[in-house]
Each structure stands twice: as structure tokens, then as C-alpha cells.
Amino acid sequence: MAKETWAVDDSRLVYGVNRNDLHFLDITEDGELCLRLRDQTITFNEVIQRIKEMNGDSPGYASSFTLRIPQLVTYQVKKLKAAFHRAIGEIEYGGKFIGIYPVKVNQRKDCVTAIIRSDSEYGLEAGTKAELLLIKKVIESEKHRPIVCNGAKDPKYLKLIRDCVKEGYNIAISVESVHESRLIVERFKPEQTNLVLRIKPYLRVEGHWSHSTGRDAKFGLSIHDLYDVVELLKQTGFADSVKTILAHPGSQITEIEAFEKFGRLMTKLYAELRDMGLSNLENIDFGGGLAIDYTSSRVANFMYRYAYLLVSGVNAQLSEMLDKYPPPNIMIESGRGVTALSTMVIVEALEVRSIFPPTRDGYVSEITKDDETKTLEKIKKASTLEEIKEIWNGFHEKYGGLNLAGMKFIFEQEKVTGNLEDAVRSRLVELNLKSYEIEGLVRSFWRTEHIVIGNFSVFNSIADHVLVKQHFPVIPVQDLHMKPQTTIRLADITCDSDGEISQFYRPDADDVWFTKDNRLLATPKGKMGDGIPVGNLENVPGSCFVLALTGAYQDAIEMDHNLLGDLPDVELYLQEDGEWVLSWVTGAESIEHLLKDVGYADIHVDEDPYMWD
Ligand SMILES: Cc1ncc(COP(=O)(O)O)c(C=O)c1O
């Protein structure tokens, strides 16, 4: 049975808000998307309105902007620490938790500052000289914080590390190859050196970057190199300088049980290396890997489960080795897990374009009309998915290919195809099937008919969408109290067809749910599908969509495709008294700046490259 009634809770389920990593988003009774921070409710429309009042005439103001909420970074840092403390307490584990933030995940000052303000002991990880310089600056008055220097190291990077050590910074240098270990022993004194042996994560795990784990990992010592490095360190008097072993299993590891195995593996290596003479080894750094729930489909306590599995893996391995070894401290370099929530891109919808003619009456030739009537009859009589597929593929083949009959015919074929598609979808709903999955369709039954043009660049704001097909939740800011009318594709203003978001995660529901125009909305088995649901298409132009969970990596890997640069940045801060304040951090990157970057220093146009009037 198609779902007839609709409540805000249904929209919560469809858009995944109010749970897991979207716990800070919710929907008001009036159907407005809102932030729920502590006990405050702030609608996105209020935020947008306030920004317009503050900055409507300022240079660099585009209708779309990036919203930063550093307090959500703090929330995640505390949550991660609490998850480990709980797990360590429950397991009665003897080692402690050490948090390290890898700045490459989001180097922005608002983000790094929020991390260090959240915890007086939290450390930072650098992957390059530039990142180390950044870290040096932000913690210049807190040199006790641990710094892990990863990444490929040249003599200049090592000199910078040596200078930092001399200045009193608490630095651990990771050794990632035999070559690096030679450079290090030539330049450092054993008693002033704190070394990390970075080892390849010899493990097979599920996740976005699983192809780069195990023996194929880009970084870390292969096991044969590890033997050579240990030998060299022993011979040169550096064996006691090794305090930590590190392996990073890859980002966004969704197979959570893998962390138990990872805990065991690293503990085994820890014990063997201690037996080989690295008797000062006291920490295991497990890198990153903590996944974000981009689809709101995982267990609610994912972060705690992750902590629990890692600690119990370490603990189980230690017990198996008869507790002969001191329990190592557990270092975690989660970046995605602590930053993703804090950033959202607010995209203004400029216009709606429709694939098929919105009104489908008017002239249609007798032959086509006749064909349409016969096909509609067949659709009405079809009773299986297989029969419907035949009909669907048949009319698409007839009306979908090269046509030299001219504009008039193309116009009528588009009207007829639109009508036939509608009739098929309505028949599918009538049939009330258990599953609508079928192989061999020339075009998805649910392909959306409307393209919303958003004032943004996918390449600049969510580059991972094109690079690794990363899914980011997309949610309209209004009309969420009603059963969605239809679905849309959100296309950007770049001249590239990859610049659009059309996939939407259809959540698990008790039954199959459809939009008012009979497009799939939710199924008993959650999965990705075509089209972002919207409440009322007419209200879309001028309103906004929120692209959520963009705080990890997206700022670091942005692209200036078509010379569309960074959107303006706005920071939201919730004060103790419950008042929220917005501050305008930067305007959109100017055309002048973008042109200078590609070698045109003499074009002086201090304007915003996005659409504005
Ligand atoms: C050494 C190291 N630590 C931590 C991270 C961050 O991992 P995640 O994105 O899973 O938080 C990375 C990311 O690639 C990494 O290479």
C-alpha cells in the first residue's frame, strides 16, 4: 500500500536527520530544516535571512555560503575521548587514550583552534613542512602537546623538526622507509629523538580506500623493511628512541569489526618489536579510519563501538600473550570523525529546468497519439515487473534515440514519453510490489524529471563527490512537513556534467514509500537511488539546500574548475546564554584572485565569481 498520510517524523527518516552523525539537524513542525545545538533551535531560513541582512551589499557575498560551526568539532573531540574512556573503563584496560588530530583533514584555523581548545592534551599530526609550521604556530604556547610528523621527509623537513625539538616542542618523527631512517640517524641524537615506526596495515578491510591498505599501502614500512630499519636503529644506538608504532588502516572504514583484528595485529607487532630490543615501545598509534555515517544508516553508537573493538582487540591479544607486556597507550589520529560535522554548504537554488514539457496537452500527430493510447492500454494491463520492463524499454527505444524528424516531432515525443513514464510509475505503485529491482532497464523508473540549478560548484565545495563518488547528504531547508512532491537533481553552475548531485540515500522504512508523483522514496532495504526529494517544486527557486558533513577533506582538496573558487565563509557560534551569533569570516574568493592563480596578474576585477545580481 502506498503511504497516504505524512508526518514530520517520516521526513526525519527520509532525510536521515536527528540521528547518528546528523543528530544536530532536525525539522520543525512547520517543515523547516533547523540546527539543534544544545537546547536551541535555529532554522536555516533564520540563518540565511540574518546573513542577507548583515552582508547583502558586501563585496564577496554570494547567495550560497559555507557555514562553519566549530562547536561541533568540540562536540566530536569530547565524544571520541569519552568513547575511549568508557571502553577503557569497561575493559579495565591499563593503557591510556591519546588523541591526535591530523591537520591535513582540515587545516583551517577555525577547525584546528577548535580542536586544541576542546582538550588541553590533544596532539596534532603533520604530513608536510607546511603543516608542521602551522602546528608550531597554533601551539606555540602549549609545547607539551604531542606532535606526530608523518609524510615523506627531506633534509629540510628534518631540519625543521630538529629546530622544533630544540625549541621545546614534543615531537615524534615517523619513519616510513629505510631511506628515511638513514637520514634520521645521520641528523639526530638518540637521546633527543622520539621515533615512530610507521608500518603498513597488513589487514583487509571494507571501506572507500580499502584498495590502499595492506601490502599495497602507499605509506609505511613493508615487513622486510621493518626488519632492516630495526637493525639499523639498533646498530646506531636508536633502539631506545622508538616509543610508538603506527599504522593507518585507510579512511572511512565501514567494516567496524575490522578494528578488533587491527587491535590484535598491532599488539602482536608491538610485542615482537619489544622482544627484538625496542624496549621503550609504549604506544600504538592506530591512525584514522573512524567512519562518518553519511547515510544515517549505521548503529547509533558507532564511535563507541569503534573504541570498544580497538581496545578489546589490544586487550585480548595482550591476554593471549599472558600479559607479559605492559599495556600500550592507544593513540588515535581520527580526522574525518572529528571534523566532518562542523561544515555545511548552503546552496541557493537559482531555477528549475524540466526534462519533459511540464504541460503535455496540445498538438500530437494522429500516429503518435494512437501509439500512446495503445501503450497506455498495455501499461494498464501489465501485472509483472518483467512485462512493465518490456513496455518501458520499448517506448524508450522508440522515442529516445536519434531523431531527424525535426523539432515538432521531438516536442511531441517528449510529451508522450513524459506521459508514458508517469503511467508506468502509477501502475508500479498500484501493483504494490515487494521489490522494484529489475535488471536491464534502459533508464531507471525513478529518473527524476527536474534539474535544480544551484549557485555552487561541486568541484569546489564537495570535490570528493566527483573524485571518489563520496555521498554527502542533501536536504532542502523547507517544505519538509509534507509528503515530497517529486525528486530533483541538484546541478551546479560549472560547465561540466559531473557537477551535479542526483543520488540520494533511500532509508529503510516499514514499507515502500513514494513521492506524490510516484517516485521511490524509501524501501524496506535502504539503498542509494536517483533523485533528491523536495516538498513543493514551486517553492524551490530562491530557497536553499544544505549539503551536510563536508568538514573533512573538502576544504583541503577543493578545485577551481571554471574559475569558481571558495564560497563565502560564515561562522555560527552559540553563546552560553543561548544566543547565537553569526560572523562573516571571508567573502567569496574574488575573480581577481582566481585569475592571478593561473598567471593573469593584471586583471583587476574584485568580484565574486558566483551568480549574483
Ligand atoms: C597517517 C594518517 N592518520 C590519520 C588519517 C586520518 O584518517 P581519517 O580520515 O580516517 O580520519 C590519515 C588519512 O589518510 C592518515 O594518513
Image (cartoon, rainbow, N blue to C red):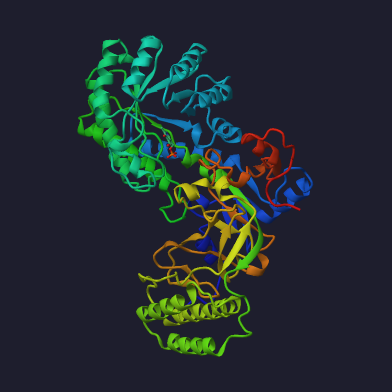
In the visual, does 33 lie left or right of 325? right
Residue drawn at 69 percent across, 56 percent down: 45
Q: Residue furthest front?
A: 404
Q: How many marks?
A: 0
Residue 99 in which image quadrant: top left
Residue 134 drawn at (x, y percent): 56, 25
In the visual, does 392 lie left or right of 452? left
In the visual, does 603 lie left or right of 222? right
Placement of 105 over or under 4, stated as above or below: above
Foreground of the two, 137 or 356: 356
Residue 355 drawn at (x, y percent): 57, 70
Q: Is residue 142 visible?
A: yes
Q: Is residue 1 visible?
A: no
Residue 418 in which image quadrant: bottom right
Q: Residue furthest right?
A: 57
Placement of 135 over or under 48, stated as above or below: above
Residue 226 drawn at (x, y percent): 27, 24
Foreground of the two, 412 or 506: 412
